[in-house]
Amino acid sequence: MREPGSTNYQRRSLAIGLRHLRFAVLASDCGSLRRAAELLTIQHSALSRSIGQLEHLVGTALFERSSGGVKPTLAGRDVLRTARLVLKQVDSLVETGRSFGSGEAGRITIALCTSISAGNLRATLVDFKKRFPQIQLAIFERSHARLLTSLQCGSVDIVISPGSVLSADNKVLSLWSERILVSLPDYHALASREVVYWTDLRNETVLLSRHDPGQELEDLLVSKLLSSEDRPKIEWHDVSRGIIKGLVNMGFGISIVLESDSASFAGLAYRELRDEMSASRIGFCAHWRSDNENPALNKLLNLLAERYSSLVPSFRE
């Protein structure tokens, strides 16, 4: 049931504008209509008329007027307190809209199948968070097979992964490349060397995770050691990369890891894997949909281009 006079009340509320509130608050802060009018660069009469309209709309006098200036009434203090809150919320609303529109606030979903315990990706995310603290980063780990599906269905904004091709329909930015390392118990004979060659793995047992990037590491091993007689024994475990490190530490074998997954682990040593020519590397790329209009994503892409535009990653065939 409509309350008596509610229509008139609503009309008065709708008639109150931000201009009324800002003028009244400034007049209160200055203690003088004339001084407030000078700051606003408007006529004294225009300011007085605006405050009179506000007093009419709220139904009470907001200021006591005298030759010395103006002072809020008891009711005026409460109205002005509310007015300040309203103006603060409006300013916040405008700033939020501006920040989201410019990409300085918002949310980015990032899918990856690599470690962020060390390396370029970790450094990039830390740098991005410092530059854009209002942008929320949602990180998802996906298998390589699921990365394309996640990107196509729009559940993630960007994929950062080893390799160059996910789909011809996506945009691609070449990033960094990472060295391939062998992880060993620190008492292992190969740990005494500064560099380990692929052929040195011949008589070893290599432990790999069935999770990514295990399959890519096996493919790389096969490409480096073409003869099956030169290849080490490979044991697959359906466990995380962290568990693989634990198994290596326990002496179950050695493992092959990306440089970004070489954070310190008790009892382990990491050595660079080389062929006859140079260090072995895998390149990383960023992939995103061409129709993605997320302004915050552009901030991340600009940062990636800024940090890695001079790098030419080396992709394995």
Image (cartoon, rainbow, N blue to C red):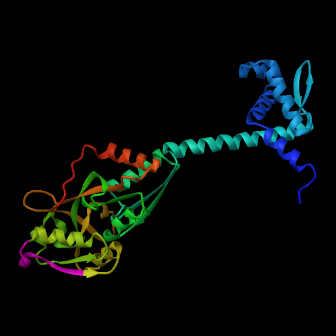
- Rendered residue at 78%/19% (across/down): 35
In the rendered view, tell whether residue 152 sits above or below residue 227: above
Q: Position of residue 208 (x, y in %)?
A: 25, 76
In the rendered view, tell whether residue 289 sits above or below residue 20: below
Viewer-proximal residue, 104 or 274? 104
Say whether residue 250 is left or right of residue 79.
left
Say whether residue 208 is left or right of residue 80.
left
Residue 213 included in the magenta stretch of the image: no
Residue 263, quarter of picture: bottom left
- Rendered residue at 84%/34% (across/down): 54
Task: State the quadrant of the N terminus.
Answer: bottom right
Task: State the quadrant of the C terminus.
Answer: bottom left
Can the viewer see residue 127 in this picture?
no
Say whether residue 21 is left or right of residue 279.
right
Can the viewer see residue 236 in this picture?
yes
In the rendered view, tell whether residue 88 sits above or below residue 170: above
Residue 254, quarter of picture: bottom left
Segment tinted magenta in the rendering: 226-235
Viewer-proximal residue, 73 or 178? 73
Residue 116, quarter of picture: bottom left
Q: Position of residue 3 (x, y in %)?
A: 91, 55
Say whether residue 241 is left or right of residue 60.
left
- Rendered residue at 50%/42% (across/down): 102
Q: Position of residue 5 (x, y in %)?
A: 92, 48
Q: Count how many numbered circles sit on residues in the image.
A: 0
Q: Position of residue 253 (x, y in %)?
A: 22, 78
